[in-house]
Amino acid sequence: MSAAPPVRTGAVVPVLASAGITVALMQTLVIPLVPELPRLLNASAAGTAWAITATLLAAAVATPIMGRLGDMYGKRRMLLISVGMLVAGSVVAALSSSLVPMIAGRALQGLAAGVIPLGISIMRDELPSEKLGTATAQMSASLGVGGALGLPAAALLAENFNWHTLFWLSAGLGVVVFALIVRFVPESSVRSGGRFDLLGGAGLSVGLISLLLAISQGASWGWTGGRTLGLFALAVIALLAWGWWETRIDEPLVDLRITARPQVLLTNLASMVFGFAMFAMSLVLPQLLQMPKATGFGLGQSMLASGLVMGPSGLIMLITAPFSAKISKARGPKVTLMLGAVVVAAGYGVGSVLMGSVWELVLVSLLIGAGIGLAYGAMPALIMAAVPVSETAAANSFNTLMRSIGTSVSSAVAGVILANLTISLGGYTLPSQSGFRTVLLIGAGAALAALAIAAFIPRGRQLDSTYTPTAETTTPERVANRA
């Protein structure tokens, strides 16, 4: 019997990376519009804030659910559904002229957040092992690349075209990516099968929405207010009940027995802390660049100029990804993650001192971007080296969720600090330089905390696309489905 022809994998990596960048672009697309949304939508500032919050909540719910469905019913299928929701949400937002359809469109866009972990999982199924490390590093870094490149692109369009153009562009990119996936990305034969855990999905959704809603709205509602404390309490109860349920069924949404393995658990904890560290750059640098020069420390730049300063950090993430894979192959992904944390901490340390000119902030963003590129390339390698093939998408999605929770907490903490360390200028209250420096130093501390957590990750097997489940982590039904 002749061997089956090899799968053509040349286009798979750029297509999947393009999908990841497109989804990440969506997250920063609306940022230039935030100050203008109340006027554009004839709504209050508190109401238009939901254009951001809705995306965050939808992404938190969709990421673990789409990962599990991908393992069960096909990762390419779920990838296409995710991109389809991005296109639908972009069209709804592009056609909107009031608040409710804008929020609905942004929520649909958020449901596409599972694209990156699904793409990493497809790579594990389809690529030869010698290409897998570099490919997954590039795909993981696409989250930061899209976010960094999206800001200058969105600012340029917002300044020169009707604001609806931003969403029509997003829809057009989504259609192109959808067509490329259909043409070049094969459907994996690796599936776990089984029955979807509806109760687990509902419990996790309630817990995550409550937690992230309390974090994102706590500053405006009051951290000791009844709504905020009630949501935190609901989150704790829902997540504890969810965890209890997940350990008692044969086909859980997230296999907590696997998640509790030291390599997976510590990687997820490091990812959450690292997500906290990463987002501090996005919160501080653009504000420093756009702050009036009259403050004595602001640089008085436009939104477009600010975006252009941040843009190189996205490119350096993409350039760093292959080096991340090489270091992981030679020394193991644990070392790469630790190195990335050191570089990010150094970047924030430099930023706390050098913040007086544009070139200094470009240098800071490049340093932090390089560290993120190294670390984000190592995270999926550590996860995939410790989980069964049939759990790849679910495990990567859960890791992505941990990063997202870290960035959400970072946003809340930085908001509290900048709201309390202020100066007055021309009748306006603005964040002070000491406030910005404090956030940067906290970012450095978070990166060092991620370094400390990563140091305890066991030295297990390195990334291996052929790794299969052991008897203790796989039910007979799953083995039969893969056979």
Image: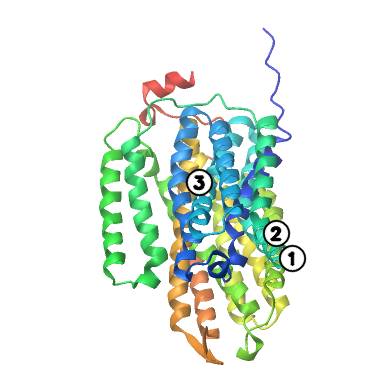
List the residue tagged with mark 3: 111
Q: Is residue 401 left or right of residue 298?
A: left
Mark 2, mark 3: which one is toward the viewer?
3
Q: Is residue 381 left or right of residue 138?
A: left
Q: Decide: marks 3, 1 in contact (CB < 8 A)? A: no
Q: What is the three-letter code of the residue carrying label 2?
A: Ile
Residue 329 location, x and y as percent? 63, 44
Question: Does dot 2 land on a helix, a strand or a loop?
Answer: helix
Residue 269 location, x and y as percent? 43, 55
Can residue 409 be seen in this snapshot? yes
Residue displayed at 70% across by 36% down: 180
List the residue tagged with mark 2: 316
Which residue is more in the foreground, 278 or 472?
A: 278
Distance of mark 3 from mark 1, alpha carbons? 29 Å
Q: Decide: marks 2, 3 in contact (CB < 8 A)? A: no
Question: Does dot 1 land on a helix, a strand or a loop?
Answer: helix
Q: What is the three-letter code of the residue carrying label 1?
A: Asn
List the residue tagged with mark 1: 160
Question: Does dot 3 land on a helix, a strand or a loop?
Answer: helix
Q: Please identify the quadrant where the N terminus is shown.
A: top right
Q: Is residue 423 left or right of residue 476?
A: right
Q: What is the three-letter code of the residue carrying label 3?
A: Leu
Mark 3 Cα-neighbour bin, 10 Å: few <14, some 14–19, many ≥20: many
Residue 241 location, x and y as percent? 25, 46
Mark 2 Cα-neighbour bin, 10 Å: few <14, some 14–19, many ≥20: many
Can residue 452 be seen in this snapshot? no
Q: Which comes sooner in the sequence, label 1 or label 2?
A: 1
